[in-house]
Amino acid sequence: MTDLLRELEREFEEKGIHKGELLKAREIAYRLLHKGSSVQEVVDITGFSVEDVEEIRQNLH
């Protein structure tokens, strides 16, 4: 049972880290767009899809 709990703890930690990384990348994308970077530049820097960046761009205002 202890091994199962450790495995679950590790899995939840990894998911939390991944979510944090995505939130930070989204914040960076927002800042880049706000400063006038093109959608393609933001795609290249963040690794997001064009669609994702367009969605972020539409929510700037």
Image: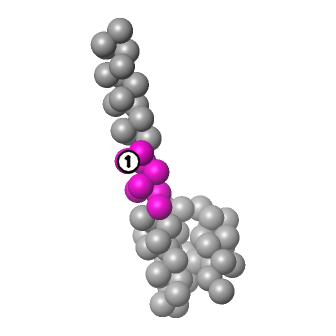
Image quarter (top left, top right, bottom left or bottom right) of the N terminus: top left
Q: Residue furthest top?
A: 1
x, y (%) of residue 6?
Answer: 31, 22
Q: Is residue 37 depicted above or below 40 in this figure?
A: below
Residue denoted by label 1: 17
Q: Which residues are the magenta region?
A: 16-23
Please give left or right for residue 47 compared with residue 10 in the image. right
Q: Is residue 25 depicted above or below 38 in this figure?
A: above
The prevailing secondary structure element of the residues shown in magenta is: helix
Residue under the image location 67 percent in, 70 percent down = 55
Q: Is residue 44 depicted above or below 33 in this figure?
A: above
Seen from the viewer's position, the closer of residues 28 and 7 is 7
Mark 1 residue type: Ile
Q: Secondary structure under badge 1?
A: helix
Circle 1 packing at 10 Å, graded few (<14), some (14-19), many (20+), is few
Seen from the viewer's position, the closer of residues 44 and 1 is 1
Query: Is residue 44 something that shows in the picture?
Result: no
Q: Is residue 38 depicted above or below 55 in this figure?
A: below
x, y (%) of residue 23?
Answer: 47, 61
Residue under the image location 42 percent in, 35 percent down = 12
Q: Residue furthest bottom?
A: 36
Residue 10 picture quarter? top left
x, y (%) of residue 50?
Answer: 62, 67
Residue 13 picture quarter? top left
Q: Is residue 34 magenta?
A: no
Residue under the image location 52 percent in, 87 percent down = 34
Query: Is residue 56 something that shows in the picture?
Result: yes
Seen from the viewer's position, the closer of residues 18 and 45 is 18
Q: Is residue 19 magenta?
A: yes
Judging from the image, the colouring scheme is one colour
Image quarter (top left, top right, bottom left or bottom right) of the C terminus: bottom right
